[in-house]
Image (cartoon, rainbow, N blue to C red):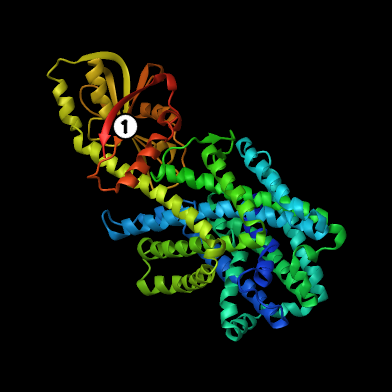
Amino acid sequence: MDSVEHSSRSSLALAALGVVYGDIGTSPLYAMKEIFAGSHHPVPITPDNVLGILSLIFWALMIVVTVKYVSFIMRADNKGEGGIMALMALALRPAEEGSRRRLVIPILGLFGAALFYGESVVTPAISVLSAVEGLEIATPALKTYVIPVTLGVLLVLFVFQKKGTAGLGALFGPVMMLWFATLAVLGVINIAATPGVLLALDPFHGLSFLGTHPVIGFFSLGGVVLVLTGTEALYADMGHFGRSPIQLAWFGMVLPALVLNYFGQGALLLQDAKAIENPFYLLAPNWALYPLVALATVATVIASQAVISGAYSVTQQAIQLGYSPRLEVQHTSDREIGQIYLPGINWTLLIAVVALVLGFGSSTNLAAAYGTAVTGTMLITNILAFCVTRWLWHWGWWRAILGALPFVLIDIAFFSANLVKIVDGGWFPLLFGLGVFLLLSTWKRGRRLLYLRLEKDAIDLKSFIGSLSLGGTTRVPGTAVFMTHNPDGVPQALLHSLKHYKVIHERMLMLTVKVLDVPRVPTAQRVTVEALSHGFWRVKVYYGFMDQPDLPHALEWCAEQGLDIDMMDTSFFLGRETLIPSLDSEMVLWREKLFIAMFRNAGSATNFFKLPANRVIELGSQVVL
């Protein structure tokens, strides 16, 4: 049994290499180059400075990734799931309705998720571009082909998304294992030539560098943080692989390979400062350049795939939690429930990525746009983790503060160092994230206002049922399902149906879908059924924020509670509201109109809930916000 368990753990660790560590694993392509030759306060190449930077890189990996994420943050799992939306739901769990935490925590979580979208745009652009730039080292004449080749690779990547990654996913792990092995070998070869570089393992060199050059040292943190890109993936993908395989992959392969490669690049710079032109590719002998460019390109495609899939997953969670309008969700695998494709998100990301590549033109320029999104997300994760330790785990104030403070200070230092890059590119992920945040928060606020308007005008359901006993209403055979947000009120669609058809069905189901703050709800707990009088039933269907709704399948479980539904004899009645802006609304007019535009273009409830299209009736009404 132990050998089987070990084999399964090893297989999951191999798979995690391809999905979880692609982003952080491709950082050696550009991180050292940005620190020593970037456009923002490049660090002069001297032996002391090289050792100081390597020391900062090593201890950043140890403290931020190993201690903070791998050892601590991954303990804050929401029923086995991670990621900023899952952490937000976890932090909200102990917060009382109407409390200030109920207001602040969603804002933090939404902005963190919005910054993740910014990272999802920058990662494919900088990763693939930095890989293809190796062609310049092989032959300077190929420089003019870097941008076209990059755009071609990215176009194929995004077009291929609709096919899914189920088939190629099995190759991701072995390819990334080859990539990390290559990183390690290239690093060892160059360290062997200059073994003195290993002195940088002593934190004194990093502290001495910061103390001797406080200004340059501070600004160098804006480049050092590039070695931490992708750390959120450790947490976000925990539900796919589990904590243990991700930790095994980190300690067994990723961390040693990264450290060896960064130190190898440092050793190369100590031998020849001119190697800063592209220290990663110059680690390799000339004969290996073209194979290395090809391997790096494949590795960056895999890294890009991970963040693109992450954007799909975050969007699905946002839809379920009520922060995003319904979007078209396609399933690309019959076996893997997490394999989804969202066309709207895919093409939006492609347009943004192409604009970035054309607008910035090089990985060095793009590096300025990277740090702000990464550090912003890490800082928000810290704050939400503090909320979890204090109010959910019931740590004392001092314990919670002292546990979070070192990581918060480090993240603030990284974030502050990246603020100087805002003018030269850091504005992009912030602006992109702010736009996403505006859309998510507007949708949540608008839906809340719409529900309040509908509830204000709603008739009490039990009083309505009681009035039916007075007669005058014809009952027709069959089952009618009315979807409603308010289980205690009469749905608008029911009132309009009665007004037009003058009949009601023998069995009337008032169906409410509720999304809980857990990733998934067990099938046995999916449905609750309450029998009312006169053939009326109140049905509640529960989903987690990572579940994919399928109402016909869920309704089959009603039979376990005495309500047997024949889907061929059932009609679904949906309300289709036409929204009218109001000057007296609680939202400003421009935001009202934005919400109305989003509402009008939201995906169909029929498709989202997998309702049989030939059994759906939509009834329209006007609602003044």
Please tell me whether residue 330 is drawn above or below residue 207 in the rendered image. above
Q: Is residue 217 left or right of residue 401?
A: right
Is residue 150 visible to the viewer in this orientation of the structure? yes
Q: Residue at x 61, y 54 (%)?
A: 359
Q: Is residue 560 left or right of residue 380?
A: left
Dividing the picture into quarters, in which one does residue 550 lie?
top left
Please tell me whether residue 245 is drawn above or below residue 474 in the rendered image. below
Q: Is residue 281 left or right of residue 526?
A: right
Q: Is residue 133 left or right of residue 102?
A: right
Q: Nearer the viewer, residue 118 or 244?
A: 118
Q: Nearer the viewer, residue 220 or 75?
A: 220
Q: Position of residue 474 (x, y in %)?
A: 21, 13
Q: Residue at x 40, y 31 (%)?
A: 605
Extreme residue in the right direction: 287
Q: Position of residue 393 (x, y in %)?
A: 39, 63
Q: Which residue is mark 1?
A: 578
Q: Position of residue 527 (x, y in %)?
A: 36, 34
Q: Residue at x 18, y 16 (%)?
A: 473
Dot 1: element? strand
- Residue type marked 1: Thr
Dividing the picture into quarters, in which one does residue 103 lie?
bottom left
Q: Residue at x 42, y 31 (%)?
A: 604
Q: Position of residue 557 (x, y in %)?
A: 40, 29
